[in-house]
Image (spheres, rainbow, N blue to C red):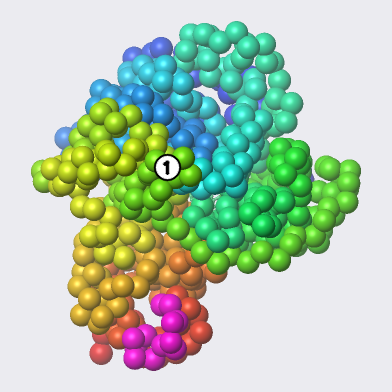
Amino acid sequence: MSTDAKPSAVEGIKDASRFLRGTLPEELASDADHFQSESMQLLKFHGSYQQEDRDARKSRSKAGLGKAYMFMIRLKLPGGKLTAEQYLAMDDIAGQYANGTLRLTTRQSIQFHGVLKGNLKNTIAGINDALVSTLGACGDVNRNVLTCPAPTGDPIRVQMMVDAEAIAAHLTPRAGSASYHEIWLNGDNVTAKLAEEEPIYGKLYLPRKFKVAFSLADDNCTDLLANCLGYQAVVESGALTGYNLYVGGGQGMTNSKPDTYPLLAQAVAYIEPNEVVKAAEAVVKLYRDHGNRSDRKRARIKYLMGDWGVEKFRSVLAKDYLQQTLALPLENPITGLDLHHGWHKQSNGQWFLGLSVENGRIKDDADYRLRSALRAIVAKFQPIVRISTQQDILLGDIVSANKAAIEAMLVEHGVPKPELLSMVQKWSMACPAIPTCGLAISESERALPGIVDQLETILTSLGLEGEPISIRMTGCPNGCARPYQSEIGLVGRSGDKYTLYLGGDSLGRRLNAELYDLVPRDRVLPMLETIFTIYKNDRQPGEDFGGYCNRVGLDALRAKCPLSTP
Ligand code: SRM
Ligand code: SF4
């Protein structure tokens, strides 16, 4: 541990938990509608968060009632990969136990919201019946491992998926798996029962969450640089020669703590394809031993990287955890990012269809019935299902003859074809925020669609509607929709006020910077209109919006676009 300061309370909870059991079994069996605080912490490792319906808070308090407790459940879904059967099982669960929606996440997973405590066990058991787990989807362990979801069939993406799954399996808690099966599945797993220790994590697990991603230089669709550990494929003559290892990315920060910040992962080394799992274990162990366990706000591996720098990190990793020298990373700059929308041919002659899902929410509204459309298509054509890190869904292994029928079913359910959506909508993302997220300060998922609609009008009037402009919004500075890596970042600051960030990059290569803090929501669009007009008239040929803001600098933009109205 890097500090002698007193370990945080969560460390004590983990220590006393007997590998993530604590009093969860007893509290789960009780009639109470929520868990006590220690169990709430442990519940996260099992893939669930205790939440409340924040919309109901005021009226319930007026009526003298307590919180309307409910639970979020998150799947562990390496590479966002599901079979048709598994997707249908998840859709059943959304209807039977949750709020009737499936929420695709920025890490290629699915969340259920609104599950009552009395239904937690059945929901988690139902998920496992479909051979999907929730263990380690949250908590101080390795989280969902990302890789390009496009089922193109090309050997590099296939290998990246294999490697992503290998890391996910290797870093799955062992003794924690035994507790998981005991609590949620009535001990129904013989191998898991044998594990009485955590050979990689130890009984304190990690200081904080840990995130891994794979990506390609010409398709950074997983936002590699936002991850604790990134594997960037190095490809020569169409073959994977190895990976550049990136370490120390993360987005979250805390306004009141200036020593917290978003950081892009740094290139540390180049490794051979057969060293993938070994490297992951080594980085995890280094983080386990050196991460800050006293201050959870500074506990992520990015602060080790920030404090140590690349040279020291590489040297400690090589000497103490790999006992070998490490090759330097190869020149392999990021040049592209594919959203994978629309129809694409796979190498086996079949097709996949990428559908943009607004803020990842699969739901049925009056004239837009995406949930029913997907259910009907998946049930009838049995495609493979993949979730992207842009909160979108891909359906694959579709034969040519079925393409027209699938398109007709989407139209019938009011789901627009991806090519009919505006660029700004396709490149937008928002986190759930209110009413489910306990940390939200401002609206996000419910606010962004209105902002995007108006932005479409502004961009069209300026003739900029064809530009892939990324806008990402979050209800607080934790950064769940990776707002600091977009061209326009809107981060909830205080009720209806947001921090506005500009100058990032739609390929995820550059962090943006704060234009103004505490911008009232109704000032955001007029301000963007002014800046887009300046951009249109002043940009260099081919210059994208983020690149322009970054080049001219935010001081210049502030001078032309003051926060206070004249
Ligand atoms: Fe996140 C916490 C939702 C991706 C940084 N995140 C939360 C919680 C669990 C709130 C809480 O702790 O009480 C949110 C649940 C809201 C709800 O009602 O569902 C939440 N995070 C999400 C999701 C669902 C957002 C989305 O729009 O999809 C994403 C789930 C990913 C998954 O499937 O595993 C999600 N969160 C991210 C990302 C993006 C990424 O990983 O690529 C980040 C920024 C990257 C990073 O980790 O730095 C992110 N979430 C955070 C943080 C800040 C952590 C930090 O150390 O700075 C928190 C707060 C915390 O952990 O204390 C947080
Ligand atoms: Fe909640 Fe903040 Fe994450 Fe949004 S960014 S889901 S408000 S923690």
Q: Quadrant of the C terminus?
A: bottom left
Left or right side of 131 for 61 = left
Q: Quadrant of residue 396?
A: top left
* Count of numbered circles in the view: 1
Nearest the camera: 276 or 260?
276
Query: Along the line of sight, which residue is nearer the eye, 468 or 247?
Result: 468
Q: In this view of the protein, can residue 317 be seen by the observer? A: yes
Does residue 209 sit above or below 66 in this rendering? below
Q: As shown in the figure, which amino acid type bears the numbered disc 1?
A: Gly
Which of the two residues, 293 or 465, is positioned nearer the viewer here? 465
Q: Is mark 1 within 8 Å of ligand 1?
A: no
Q: Position of residue 493 (x, y in %)?
A: 38, 62
Residue at the farthest left position: 366
Q: Is residue 308 above or below residue 20?
A: below
- Give how far across and how far down residue 165 sits, in percent: 59, 34
Q: Quadrant of residue 519?
A: bottom left
What is the quadrant of the N terminus in the image?
top right
* Residue that label 1 marks: 349
Please report the residue visible at 39 percent of the width from the left and 91 percent of the height from the top: 538
Residue 20, horizontal then vertical, whole percent? 58, 23
Numbered range of the magenta stretch: 534-545
Residue sitting at x 38%, y 26%: 86
Position of residue 421 measured from the top left corner of the image (x, y, whole percent): 25, 60
**Residue sitting at x 22%, y 76%:** 460
Judge whether residue 58 can be spotted in this image. no
Magenta stretch holds residue 248: no
Secondary structure found at label 1: loop
Image point (17%, 43%), residue name: 408
Displayed quadrant of residue 287: top right
Q: Is residue 97 above or below residue 184?
A: below
Badge 1 local density, few (<14 within 10 Å), some, or many (20+)? few
